[in-house]
Image (cartoon, rainbow, N blue to C red):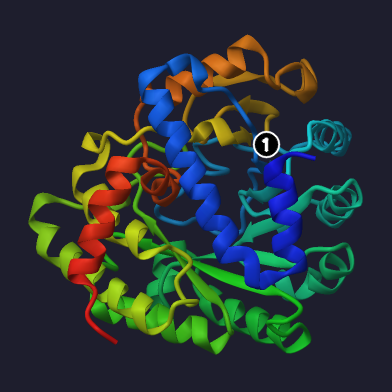
Amino acid sequence: MSLESLARKVARSVPATAPLLKAGYRQRERWLTGMGDIWPGLVRAQTEKITIAITAHCNLRCQGCKYGRDFMPGAVLPMPIYRDLIADAAAAKVPAVRLYGGEPLLHPDVVEMVEITNAVGVGCYMTTNALILDRKIDALHAAGLRKITMGYYGQGTAFDEYVQRPGRYDRLVESLDATRARFGADKLDLQFNFLLSRRSANREAVDEVRRFAERYDASIHVDVVHYSLPYFQEGPERELQFRPEDADDVRRTIDYLLELKAKYPHLLTESPVALAAFEDWAMKQDRMRIPCDARKLLWVGADGSVMLCYVTFPLGNLHDKRLRDMLYTPDHHQAARDAFALNCPNCHCEAGSRVEKHGPSFRKYAAVARERTPPV
């Protein structure tokens, strides 16, 4: 058993140890990142999570998403390929997978996927739009699903306009009400992924998602609007993407997020250090030069394609060869080194963890967080 696996086991058994173990892990990663800056050959792939798009089909048409339209239209990951994928992940001791799409609940075998993933000892969680979650949550929970994350795109007509489907907000609320009524926070972990964009960089939008999360006893994860994901688009007239004139709005919003983090430590999943860095991620975008830790990741598309991360570094296709034949090969390790060196579009996926794992950035934004967080 690896040190990381042992730490995760201890944290699950004794939750009070989790913050200390996580801090130790981050400190170790900062040391490794520093060594990688000096000796790049030390950087090697070590997969900790596989994100799997099990289908490109979706029942929404979000303004910021291309899935099922311009990106992998009609693609669905077959169950036999998924079985082999999970068997290989378990054999390689990959700790966790994330199921998403498209909309993963539209995959006809989604419950079985959760079941076999848990059966082989690989942790599993799901990202869904939750529109039909209430119709499948009993079977999913019985299969072992204990964590669900959901995109948050506003409320009422604002939500319906963003997903470009009338009446879907009411269906979402109905689904979430029923799901939470059946499974409380001690049985099912819910998280809303708040998209920080030109539309939402204001105190009102943050308060809105805070109240929504409190209604469902859920946490909030902040995603800064993307600029390089192949399946993301910036909306009509690039209205989601930040512009130089948005700098003051972004700064005020980050200050408010830091204030909320101080008042409600468990509401926001990011650390104060990560939140403080989001202002620069939003405004500088690919000019942020912080080593990427994609060596910890793998991404699998609904068409079977395998890449190191969401954006680039293709490793093969599961229709042609199994995952075990792609893991920890010279190509895999080289992709990890190229990601670390930012020989890529330099997206801001995993932005928070990248800051926390890079010593100079950690110290810089820790100081920013201390300076800008008001006393509680």
Q: Residue at x 70, y 43 (%)?
A: 3
Q: Amino acid at mark 1?
A: Ala
Height in image: 297 above or below 216? above
Q: Give the quadrant of the N terminus.
A: top right
Is residue 48 left or right of 192 when viewed as pictured? right
Q: Nearer the viewer, residue 195 or 375?
A: 375
**Structural crowding at the residue carrying mark 1, measured as other residues with C-alpha within 10 Å and reported as few (<14), some (14–19) or many (≥20):** many
Q: Residue at x 41, y 43 (%)?
A: 354
Q: Measuring from the top left, give residue 212's x and y in whole percent.
A: 48, 83
Q: Is residue 238 visible?
A: no
Q: Measuring from the top left, give residue 126's x and y in whole percent.
A: 68, 57
Q: Measuring from the top left, give residue 143's x and y in whole percent.
A: 88, 62
Q: Measuring from the top left, give residue 84's x and y in whole percent.
A: 86, 31
Is residue 259 left or right of 349 when viewed as pictured? left
Height in image: 243 above or below 215? above
User: Which residue is under mark 1?
Assistant: 302
Q: Quadrant of residue 268?
A: bottom left
Q: Is residue 57 visible?
A: yes
Height in image: 26 above or below 156? above
Is residue 313 left or right of 175 when viewed as pictured? left
